[in-house]
Image: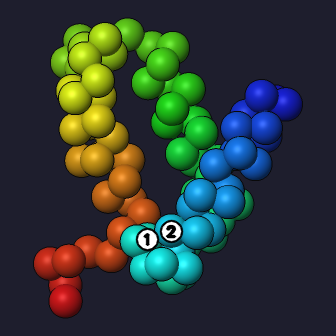
Amino acid sequence: SALLQDCGEFLAPYISAARLTGEVRNDLDIRSASEWFARMLFSLFTTPSPFVDTRDDEGVAGFVRAYVVRGFVHDRGKR
């Protein structure tokens, strides 16, 4: 969809910058990661959750940090 593509293209420079600064994995494919992140955001915003109160900014941020962002960083347990 055009909206998914637009959102992915919007996110790509931020994810690319994070890769350059070492905030995300060096092997992260920017295009795929941007699309995946956009899909997760769409799901979070459009599908009610029985566990995450989307009106609670801190709750949403914690969920995103724990599950969405973890897919972009190195597994610190393997270092």
Q: Amino acid at mark 1?
A: Val
Q: Please identify the residue farthest to the right as the structure is shown.
A: 2
Report the colour scheme.
rainbow
The residues bearing labels 1 and 2 have C-alpha atoms spaced at a distance of: 6 Å
What percent of the width, then of the height, locates residue 4? 73, 34
Q: Label 2, secondary structure: give it.
A: helix
User: For this view, does 43 lie left or right of residue 68?
Assistant: right
The residue where tag 1 is placed is 24
Q: Amino acid at mark 2?
A: Ala
For the residue pair 57 and 77, the one nearer the viewer reads as 57
Q: Label 1, secondary structure: give it.
A: loop
- Work out whether 25 lies above or below 71: below
- Residue 18 numbered mark, or none: 2
**Residue at the image point whose x is 26% and y is 74% from the top:** 75
For the residue pair 49 and 20, the one nearer the viewer reads as 20
Q: Determine whether label 1 and label 2 are within 8 Å by CB.
A: yes
What percent of the width, then of the height, locates residue 5? 78, 40
- Work out whether 70 lies above or below 48: below
